Amino acid sequence: MLKLKKWFHSSGSADAEPALSSSTSEKLRETLMKLEKKESILQSKISMENERAKECTRSRNNKGKIQCLKRKAFYESQLEQLQNIQLQVNDQMKMFKGVSMVTKV
């Protein structure tokens, strides 16, 4: 109960809230940038596996081709999950901006 009072009780000046909001929005932006970097890495891995699969097809290496396609499918599923996380972070940023606008007024 005491912890809840500490969380919801506004002790301190009004300057503490803008500092919190700027640090939170900055953390969300950093997270979004990291996710975008991971997305570009995964896209390059997908294209690399696609090229390897084409090379294996030319050399008639069916086992290698199947392995490349499996890795490509794995990377694509990871990319889809990453894009969903990016959407969630964007939604959090929008909600946070809305809340900060309401508290400023």
Image (cartoon, grey):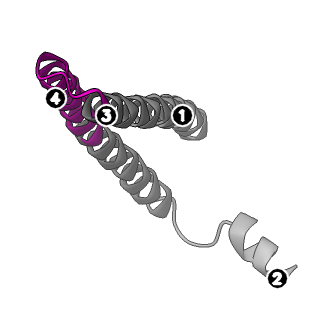
Question: Which of label 3 and label 2 is nearer to you?
Answer: 3
Question: Which of label 3 and label 4 is nearer to you?
Answer: 3
| Image location of residue 17, percent across then percent down | 50, 57
| Image location of residue 30, percent across then percent down | 30, 48
Which region of the structure is painted magenta? Answer: 38-62
**Element at label 3:** helix
Q: Which quarter of the rendered picture does the N terminus lie within?
A: bottom right
Which is the main secondary structure of the residues drawn in magenta? helix
Comes first in the chain, label 4 or label 1: 4
Comes first in the chain, label 1 or label 2: 2
Q: Can residue 69 be seen by looking at this rendering? A: yes
Q: Which residue is mark 1?
A: 88
CA gap, disc 1 and disc 2: 31 Å
| Image location of residue 76, percent across then percent down | 39, 28
Q: Can residue 9 be seen by looking at this rendering? A: no
CA gap, disc 3 and disc 1: 38 Å
Amino acid beneath label 3: Lys
Amino acid beneath label 2: Leu
Q: Which residue is mark 4?
A: 52
Q: Which residue is mark 2?
A: 2
CA gap, disc 3 and disc 4: 12 Å
Numbered badge on residue 63: 3
**Element at label 1:** helix
**Element at label 2:** helix
Q: Residues within 10 Å of mark 1 (few under 14, many from 20)?
A: few
CA gap, disc 4 and disc 1: 33 Å
| Image location of residue 43, percent across then percent down | 24, 29
